[in-house]
């Protein structure tokens, strides 16, 4: 691809905020501290988690950059950034969540494979760009197409970065054509994040954003959009990011048995406390986030102070001053809700959060029941163990 290239080493990585917690250095994988995550509804770009599988690509000449649309189309096309920008622009508020969010907690039960993440491998941004459905019309694929006359059913996104898992080849993924051509699915070719030009870590000059779907399908540093009969056969679609039952291990795994994970399930986490924390008895504000995939809103967030025996409801919000309703057409349906609950901390508290989405889906109580060897989608109840600050230092007396 002229204009955009992938270095083969890590000598030209961008600068990053020093407060990020680095889970892997090369490729760079980092998340913000919990408290920073819930400081605002829209996550600042420098505090947004960064997940890469190789060195960060470099734009040498933005005027020479083109994204090509090829595969089963009558007239393949190459679009410059100016041409992408001349299409109607949409600003979509969407939470991007890595399927590996909360993996560290899953691996504590039994080892899993993959980069460890605490609860902050997600963020909520305002993505600005063109709708993929509008772009596909330019190559003759109408809105709401499930199958083309040539038999195409999938849209594949191919990057330029060099990934170990692809033996040095680029990162790629696909989504169904039905979703790609549905304007209401809000799939974007984004060139802005929070009103700023997308930065290198997040996919400059152009990335895909597939709202409500695990982050792995939102391909960064987009080179090529391929219209295909089959779903993407790349590593990250076929040999990764699939959900297996707890009984599957590395000896009996059969990757072709399972479909690539797309929508993420209902998730929530407390961000105002660490997993084991010291808090004085008395009043405390607990805060965190809840989010569900597929455009489902958050109907309820429940908080327990006694390990799940009894529950109280937390207050949910997106924008301050606007009451949140989970299925409000004017709400941000792809975005998280933040929650707050004022509680009275008892002795030996175990604080738990669980959320319910607008389809009444709930989170599993324990990590054991959803444990899987790749450690994806740990959505088990998030638990915090409290040690009482007044008692702890004297407990040996
Ligand atoms: N080209 C490319 N796109 C990619 C990836 C990647 O490594 N290369 N990682 C994916 C994964 S697993 C996630 S979770 C998101 C992370 O996006 P972010 O770094 O902007 O938060 O990008 C996705 N798109
Ligand atoms: Mo991810």
Image (cartoon, rainbow, N blue to C red):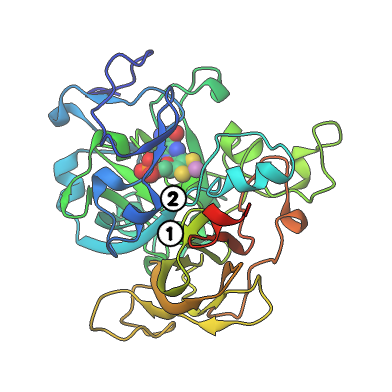
Circle 2 residues within 10 Å: few <14, some 14–19, many ≥20: many
Report whether residue 72 is seen. no
Res 120 label: 2
Q: Quadrant of residue 77?
A: top left
* Residue 368 position within the rendered picture, expressed as x and y whole percent measured from the top left: 76, 54
Left or right of residue 119, residue 63 in this image: left
**From the viewer's perspective, is residue 170 above or below residue 43?**
above
Res 271 label: 1
Q: Do callouts 1 and 2 mark residues in contact (Cβ within 8 Å)?
A: yes
SS at mark 2 in the image: loop
Residue furthest front as drawn: 397
User: Could you tell me which residue is drawn at 24 percent across and 78 percent down?
Assistant: 320
> Toward the viewer: 216 or 232?
216
Q: Is mark 1 within 8 Å of ligand 1?
A: no
**Quarter of the image that includes the C terminus:** bottom right
Left or right of residue 246, residue 96 in this image: left
Q: If you read the primary sequence from the N terminus, does the residue marked by circle 1 or circle 2 appear first?
A: 2
């Amino acid at each position: 691809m002229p204009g955009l290239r992938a270095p083969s080493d890590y000598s030209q990585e961008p600068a990053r905020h020093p407060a990020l917690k680095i889970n892997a250095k090369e490729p760079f994988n980092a998340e913000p501290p919990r408290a920073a995550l819930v400081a605002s509804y829209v996550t600042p770009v420098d505090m947004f988690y960064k997940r890469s599988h190789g060195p960060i690509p470099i734009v040498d000449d933005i005027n020479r950059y083109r994204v090509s649309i090829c595969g089963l189309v009558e007239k393949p096309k190459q679009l410059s950034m100016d041409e992408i920008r001349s299409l109607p622009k949409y600003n979509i508020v969407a939470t991007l969540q890595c399927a590996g969010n909360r993996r560290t907690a899953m691996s504590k039960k039994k080892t899993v494979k993959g980069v460890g993440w605490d609860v902050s491998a997600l963020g909520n941004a305002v993505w600005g760009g063109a709708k993929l459905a509008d772009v596909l019309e330019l190559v003759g694929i109408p809105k709401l197409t499930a199958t083309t006359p040539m038999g195409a059913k999938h849209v594949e996104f191919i990057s330029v970065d060099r990934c170990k898992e692809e033996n040095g080849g680029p990162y790629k993924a696909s989504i169904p054509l039905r979703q790609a051509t549905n304007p209401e699915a809000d799939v974007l070719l984004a060139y802005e994040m929070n009103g700023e030009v997308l930065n290198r870590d997040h996919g400059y000059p152009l990335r895909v954003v597939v709202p409500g779907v695990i982050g792995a399908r939102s391909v960064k540093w987009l080179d090529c959009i391929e219209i295909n009969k089959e779903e993407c056969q790349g590593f990250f679609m076929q040999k990764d990011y699939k959900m297996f039952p707890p009984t599957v291990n590395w000896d009996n795994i059969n990757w072709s048995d399972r479909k690539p994970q797309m929508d993420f399930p209902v998730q929530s986490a407390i961000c105002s406390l660490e997993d084991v924390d010291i808090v004085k008895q008395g009043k405390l504000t607990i805060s965190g986030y809840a989010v569900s995939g597929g455009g489902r809103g958050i109907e309820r967030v429940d908080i327990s102070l006694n390990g799940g025996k009894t529950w109280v409801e937390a207050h949910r919000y997106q924008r301050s001053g606007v009451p949140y309703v989970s299925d409000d057409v004017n709400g941000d349906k792809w975005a998280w809700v933040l929650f707050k609950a004022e509680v009275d901390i008892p002795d030996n508290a175990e604080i738990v959060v669980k959320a319910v989405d607008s389809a009444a889906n709930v989170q599993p109580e324990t990590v054991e029941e959803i444990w899987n060897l790749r450690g994806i989608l740990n959505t088990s109840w998030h638990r915090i163990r409290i040690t009482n600050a007044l008692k702890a230092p004297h407990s040996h007396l």
